[in-house]
Amino acid sequence: MIKLIPLIFLVFLMGCSISPKKESPLIVKTILPKELKEISGITSVGDDLWVITDKPKSRVFKLSAQGRLLQIVNVSNVEATDVEAIASDATFIYLADVGDNMGDRVERKVIRIAIASIPAGEEVEITGETIEFTFPNEVVVESKKQNNYDCESMLSFKDSLYFFTKDREDKETKLYAIPKAPGKYAARYINTFNSEGLITDAALNKAGNELALLGYRKGHTFPFIYLFNDFRGENFFSGKHQKIELADKNWDWQLEGIAYGNNNNLYFSCEETKEVTATLYGINRSSLFKLAKQKKEKKKTKDKEETSEDERLKR
């Protein structure tokens, strides 16, 4: 089947304009290898990206900033059920075995691996430590659509890990925190945000003053990014936020990974679907802001033209 190109990529290619002379604001657009066709999380460590797939394997992949596969790291001593998120700090990479599509899971864990202990080589093995936790008040649900405790998003901030739920029933996301140290915990609830869609990944910029949430609506359609600023401490929803729509049509575009890299660059990725090939994208944060502004202006122009046409027809 020929892969269709999502609208957002067409917009990028055209520089967010109808003029073909403008260059695309994308700095990276890389088709990923078959090992990463189900890429579902990204984090940045130095100049490199570390990514995971939502396979039942304790495995992490190292990529260059351009998306070239550099290394595969297998965690030999910890089994996984559904790894759906990844985060990092200066010392560790955290793999979140937290997926719960059907709503029948209660216990979850994070696999912590020391960055300095990862050996050289194309494919290597390493041991990890576990951080186990539960969400408070969670119960097994009767159907997938009633599941408000699925989770695919995690980030590292100071001495804690933060999780954003993928509420299938309420289309909201709840923010929880646990300590980074190995042990067993009940996740601590912080706040809820009405995302009006399913949140699939989260990231903090290098300065720690901007949060990005990635998500989509039903059927992996109409993906979006929320940017949060001016928040107080760990309550990331307490400040201002801006929503950036990434598509105008009903594409099956399954965006599930986002990360801030060096030089204020923002990376996001999509899994392979019947319409879209697994791809890594990179864009400078300032260009993403321009994209949002241009799309908003384009919508205003379209609405104005439609209003003018309606008034003409009424005459």
Image: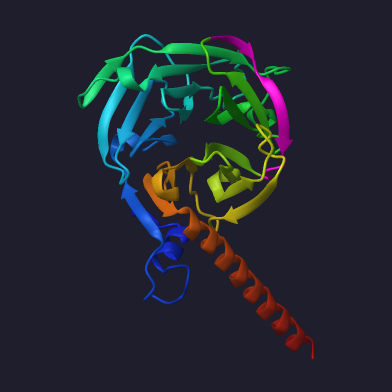
Res 305 → quadrant: bottom right
Residue 181 belongs to magenta span: no
Residue 22's place in the image compared with 147, above or below, is below
Task: Please report the bounds of the magenta region as a residue range.
Answer: 183-196
Residue in view at x 59 percent, y 39 percent: 199
Whether residue 289 can be seen here: yes
Left of 111 or right of it: where is 115?
A: left
Residue in view at x 45 percent, y 49 percent: 264
Whether residue 141 can be seen here: no
Q: Main secondary structure of the magenta part?
A: strand
State the residue in front, 247 or 181: 181
Left of 93 or right of it: where is 211?
A: right
Q: Give coordinates of residue 165: x percent, y percent.
A: 63, 31
Residue in view at x 44 percent, y 54 percent: 284
State the residue in front, 16 or 39: 16
Res 186 → quadrant: top right
Furthest-front residue in view? 207
